[in-house]
Amino acid sequence: MTGVKSAAGGAARQAAAGLPRLLPPVPGDPEELTEHLARHGRPRYHGSALLHAVKSAGLTGRGGAAFPTHVKLAAAKEAGHPVVVANGAESEPASEKDAALLYHAPHLVLDGLALAADAIGAGRAYLYLHAGHAARIQKALTERRNLRLDPVAITVVAAPARFLAGQETALVSRISGGPALPTFDSRRVTERGILVQNVETLAHLALISRHGPDWFRERGTRAEPGTMLLTLHAGGRPRVTEQPIGVPLRSALGLTDAAAVLVGGYHGTWLTAAAVDSLTLDNAALRQHKASLGAGVLAALPHGSCGLVETARVTRYLAAESAGQCGPCLNGLPRMAGALAELAGPRPRRSTLHDVERWAGLVTGRGACHHPDGTARFVRSALTVFGAELKRHASGECTATERAPVLPLPSGYAAPTTEEAWR
Amino acid sequence: MTSSTTLWYASRATGFVALILLTVVFAAGIGISRQARIPGLPRFAVTDLHRNLSLLAVAFVAVHVISAVLDTFVSIPVLSAVIPFASSYERFWLGLGAISFDLMLAMIITSLVRGRLNRLTWLAIHLTAYLSWPVAFLHSIYSSGDLRHGVLLDLSLGCAVIVGAAVIWRLVSVVRRLPRAQRVAAQLAAAQPAAGSPPRRTPRTLPPRTAR
């Protein structure tokens, strides 16, 4: 296995396989409304026929939890006076797939949002996204209004640039006019009649409404049909690609050599290179390694970078992004970050490793949202996968020859200190 | 000692024990809100102490009330246990006891169904502890002369001092409380230089001493 396939050759091969489905065939080219309608045509399935089609297609949420979409659609419809929210406020610094989708195929997302709203009888629909996309989306919405494409009015709501802004309850709070902070409510958001779907999920739904469930199942696995958008960090700038679920993880990553791979983003799991070789791009396979695809982030750690240093940097960011509401998260995450900074340095105290493991157990399951759980999973997987590196650090050595950071974080990042930062 | 005096003494003894228990429950409740620890015990021990002693205290209050009603030395109607000022005997001071008891029942019932309640509703009712304890204290001191002299007076004043100190301890934390938005940054700043470790170079300047 040598050499790299030319980009054009790769694109031709993909087009022959009916890919990409969501992104435009020529990368870097946003789809205007006329192009969008010419490429995808008008939806065929509506209302309850669409709900059945989504169920047969086996579409799952692409925001990270991979929850069956038809279950949420049915539950929101059941609740009465439903509202639909398209969640495009991806806040993971390593993920760019929602931004890429909103840039390249805004009309597919808006189609899906309108179709879902119509199918469950929602009177209102919202698109929740980072302020940077708002102007382009407003323009797209005006074009659609002129053609009277959407049966419901779509309101755009801007999300603050916070890691937790896209969390479901934080989203509901923000759309209701409050801060984008996670809230605790014994009733699930969907049971309250608020259907929150990731923008990619809605784009897939828009395609199912045109081509039907059998077409959707032509790609992917039986349990997890379809394609998914991935953000790949494999040297150079991050790339967004669309891949059928179930392809070998190594080929999805498009890289032959890495020290370790982070799967599922900053709430995800580090995997050894050996594990990556044996695994496929689906949650059923990843589950054996206590990992999941999350929102489709795959990040390769190159040889010569220290996984502990990377993990410590990201953990500090995650700790700083705690909403500061729940004690275990507010107290536990900064301590874990401090201890990881020590483990990433030379000759940490023996007790520090033990402390981190203990704190990871103490914070799990004890927040209003899953921020402490996800952070603890990420940290624990690092302590397992980089076990040999921990030993080296104990004797004052490190394998790193490269000090440039690998995992992306917002530039000039500092913990927020005002309430306005959550609005 | 006749059966009547048995009930009379039982009522006053359980009432006094209830006052001491309620004092500990009050202090433990403030301990929870300050995230205090009892040396050698995990943090949830304070919560458990608060919960279990509050139920025990109410059991003592129940015996205190029932024995006072059953006692025939003075006539106290059974309803005056929950309806304030319904007793012609010591109308005002027994009324205070009923008010305090009602608030205690409200706090316990809302705590038992806390999972079904809005957090602010539960909190608002639980904050009536700051009213319930002083009212119970006045009831204890003025309903009978027992607590107004000797060892019982000393113990009662001790209870008042404990509650007063607990309230001050709580208020200090309210004054010092950081706004939510600033808490995380403060915690991070406190956690960053690993406490107690010798000065070390930061990871960024770790010399690459690779075996390869």
Image (cartoon, coloured by chain):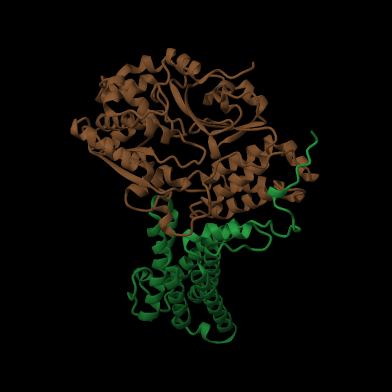
**Residue A152, horizontal then vertical, whole percent:** 22, 35
Residue B115 seen in render = yes
- Indicate left or right for A193 with B182 as reference: left
Residue A246 seen in render = no
Q: Chain A's colour?
A: brown
Give the quarter of the image for residue B122. bottom left
Q: Residue furthest bottom?
A: B149
- Indicate left or right for A354 with A293 as reference: right
Relative vertical location of residue A250 with respect to residue A154 in this rendering, above or below: above
Quadrant holding the N terminus of chain A: top right
Name the residue: 47% across, 48% down: A368
Q: Nearer the viewer, residue B19 or A249?
A: A249
- Indicate left or right for A25 with A389 as reference: left
**Residue A100, horizontal then vertical, whole percent:** 42, 33
Relative vertical location of residue A94 with respect to residue A323 in this rendering, above or below: above
Q: Nearer the viewer, residue A399 or A235?
A: A235
Q: Chain B's colour?
A: green
Name the residue: 68% across, 37% down: A305
